[in-house]
Image: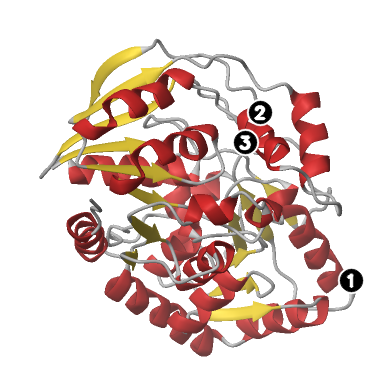
Amino acid sequence: MKLALVVQRYGADIAGGSEALCREYAERLSAHHDVTVLTSCARDYLTWANAVPAGVTQERGVTVRRFPVLRERQAGRFRDLSDAVFGPDPVSPDLEDEWFRENGPQVPALVEHLRAEGSRYDRVLFFTFRYYPSYFGLPHVANRAILVPTAEEDPAIRLGQLEALFSRPAGYLFMTPEEQTLVETSAGRALPVTAVSGIGIEPAGTTPDRAPLDALGLPEQYVLCLGRVDRNKGAHTLAALFLEHLAQGGQPTTLVFAGPGAEPLPTDSRIRSLGFVSAEVRDALFAHATLLAVPSRFESLSIALLEGWNRGVPALVNGQCRVLAGQVHRAGGGLAYRSPLEFSESLSYLLTHEAEAHTLGAAGRDYVDREYRWPVVMARVESVLSRSRRT
C-alpha cells in the first residue's frame, strides 16, 4: 500500500509520545509499504517556529515531506482561547475551530496537499486529534483515514466539534481499551474497524551495571519517576505526596525524577531530579529501580509503565487516571492509589514486601510479552489497514 502518516513534528530526536509512536510505526510499516510522513518544519511544540527546511528527505527508509508553518503560536491568544473553550459556558463551533487553528502547527500547505493529492494514498494515518494537521486535514481524506487519537481525559476531549471529527475516519488505532471508550463516548456511538494496538517494546537485554547510578550518587533503593517533569504529568503532586508520606512516618526511601522540566521540584535530600538523562543512564535506572511511580492523571498509554514492566519493576500509579488503573489491573503489575493515604500505604507495602513486589513486577513483564511486542502490535495495525477503506 501507499501510506501517508500525518503528525505535527517528526524526527529521531523529537520528544513526544505521539511523535515517537508515529516514527516507530512509519519505520516498521516501510518494510512492507510505500510510506511518506507529512509533517511540519517545527521542532518546538510551544512556538511551532520553523526550524527544519521544507521539502522531502529520506530518514531511515521513510520519505519525510515537511511543510512550513504559516504562523507561530501566539501564546496570549492561545491562552485566552483555551480559557474560553474550556470554560463553563458553551462556545460557538467557530471558536473551537479557532482553538485548533491556534494550537497549531498551522500548515495550510499540508492540508492543501491532502485535499489535492490525498487520493494518491491508499491509507492516511493521523497521529493525535488535537493538532491542526489532523483536525483540518482528516476531513479531506476521511474515506481512507485511520485516526490514532492518543486521547486523554483532559478538557480537550470535551470539545463539541469532536463528535463530528471522531465519526469521520474509516478506521481507528487506540492505545488502550479505556482510550477507545473515551473516544466512542465523544463520538456518541461505537466505532467501526478498530484495534487496540499500543506501542511495541523490545525485550530487555542483560541487566546493565549500576556504575552510571553510582556515579550520580543514587542509593541502592529508590523509587523512579521517568518522563517530563511538569505539573500536567503529576510530577509536583507526586513530590508533595512523597514528602507527606515521609512526614507521617512512612517507609523511608529516595524518589528519583528523570526527565526534562522547567519548574523546579521541592528541595529535599530524599528527592533527586536528574533532568534529561542518556540512554545508558535511563536503562540503568529502570533496571535497578525498586519500583516505578506513574503519577499522571492524563494518559492514553504510559510507555514508561511498559518499560518498567519490561525490566520486571512493580508499579505504583495514579488510580484517578482510568488508563493507568486499567493497565495495572489487566497486567496485575502493581498498585493504584486514589488518595494520599492510599499512596503512603501502597508505597510502604511495596518497599517492605520484597517477594510480593517481585511477583507484581514479573506479572507486568508477562503482560508486556503477551500484548506489547512489536510483532503483536504491527499485526493489529496491519489488520486495520486491510479492513478500513471506505468507498
Check the image and name the residue furthest to the left.
32
Q: Is residue 221 left or right of residue 147?
A: right
Q: Secondary structure at mark 3?
A: helix
Q: Quadrant of the N terminus?
A: top left
Number of callouts: 3
Quadrant housing residue 359: bottom left
Pick the residue in front: 304 or 344: 304
Q: Earlier in the sequence, mark 1 or mark 2?
A: 2
Residue 144 pos. (x, y %): 28, 46
Tell me what residue is drawn at x 75 percent, y 25 percent.
Answer: 75
Q: Identify which amino acid the numbered label 1 is placed on.
A: Ala
Label 3 sits on residue: 100
Tell me what residue is drawn at x 69 percent, y 36 percent.
Answer: 94
Q: Identify which amino acid the numbered label 3 is placed on.
A: Phe
Tell me what residue is drawn at x 57 percent, y 25 percent.
Answer: 44
Label 1 sits on residue: 247
Residue 85, visible in the rendered structure:
yes
Label 2 sits on residue: 102
Report, in whole angstroms, how far the alpha carbon at label 2 lies from the one at label 3.
6 Å
Report, in whole angstroms, how far the alpha carbon at label 3 lies from the one at label 1.
44 Å
Q: Identify which amino acid the numbered label 2 is placed on.
A: Glu
Pick the residue in front: 300 or 111: 111
Q: Is residue 146 left or right of residue 80?
A: left
Residue 379 pos. (x, y %): 19, 62
Rendered position, 334 above or below 110: below
